[in-house]
Amino acid sequence: MKAALVGTDGTLLHEARRATGRKRGADAVVETILAFAAELRAYGEEHFGETAVAAGVAVPGIVDAEKGIAVYAANLGWRDVPLRALLGERLGGIPVALGHDVRTGGLAEGRIGAGRGADRFLFVPLGTGIAGAIGIGSTIEAGAHGYAGEIGHIVVRPDGPDCGCGQRGCLETLASASAVTRAWAAASGDPEADAADCAKAVESGDPAAIAVWRDAVDALAAGLVTALTLLDPRTLIIGGGLAEAGETLFTPLRAAVEERVTFQKLPHIVPAALGDTAGCLGAGLLAWDLLSTEVSA
């Protein structure tokens, strides 16, 4: 878990990290979140002389932001957690905003990161899975049911690997950091090898690594072209662990996307700017937005 104190202009004033401790169960994870938030507020009072005026929290899985409920997260094992109410109570009644982790990271990238100034953008972090955040102006489109942006479950290879969602050949089974890790571990014969090792091997000219990387980039380009056909973003922001490979990823990816477009306008394809602080900054922006809404109301 990452947490931060964020100023009115999005400045990161203080950052802290803590293990989620998910092996202890969902209830323990929730309690850890509440305690972490309380400690952060106390730190702010001690070091900045004033208390936090609002809080934002971003969580994975299915989120009902309107009701403030963390509906479901497979990795954390929780269901229907009234996180906004619990945090508000622990933090003395200050306003609390709840958001989805990828959409919240996308909000930060759009306003103060790589998408700043773009009226339409798509933020796609390539991590354990692949999700997306659809940016329109200075907001993120959540969809009618909160599921918008799930680009990782676009089917790009109908005969591909089984996906946890029940389909086969979903983008995230082929082009996520974990998918590249699996493919490279098998191709290299080293069960400990990961996506970062694959990228290094690509840079050194290893033919097996180049083949694994090419397959992932090809699948990723196919999924992204489907997304840009539907959404027509001006900027395409790629983040997550796989993006840390830099031009080893971006040079072939830009070429592969360009090869596939026909009538579509090619967006600017850029790396994310905020790294793993995007979620913290986005949660802070959600909190400030909450106060702005209350003032205007």
Image (cartoon, rainbow, N blue to C red):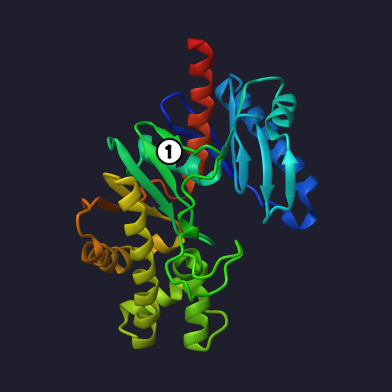
| Res 158 seen here | yes
Question: Which quarter of the figure has residue 213?
Answer: bottom left
Q: At numbered mark 1, what does the secondary structure look like: helix, strand or loop?
A: helix
Residue 162 percent location from the top left of the image: 57, 72
Residue 28 percent location from the top left of the image: 79, 47
Along the line of sight, the residue nearer the viewer: 292 or 190:
292
> Relative to residue 294, is residue 148 depicted above or below?
below
Q: Amino acid at mark 1?
A: Ala
Looking at the image, residue 67 sits to the left or right of residue 149; the answer is right
Residue 26 percent location from the top left of the image: 77, 49
> Which residue is pictured at 73% across the width and 54% down the height?
22
Looking at the image, residue 149 sits to the left or right of residue 232; the answer is right
> Relative to residue 204, is residue 294 depicted above or below?
above
Looking at the image, residue 186 sits to the left or right of residue 217; the answer is right
> Relative to residue 123, is residue 138 depicted above or below?
above
Along the line of sight, the residue nearer the viewer: 215 or 271:
215
> Which residue is pictured at 48% across the width and 37% down the height?
282
| Res 271 seen here | no
Residue 101 percent location from the top left of the image: 54, 44
> For mark 1, what is the residue?
108
Question: Which quarter of the figure has residue 68?
Answer: top right
> Within 10 Å of the Cα at label 1, are there few (<14), some (14-19), or many (20+) other Cα atoms?
many
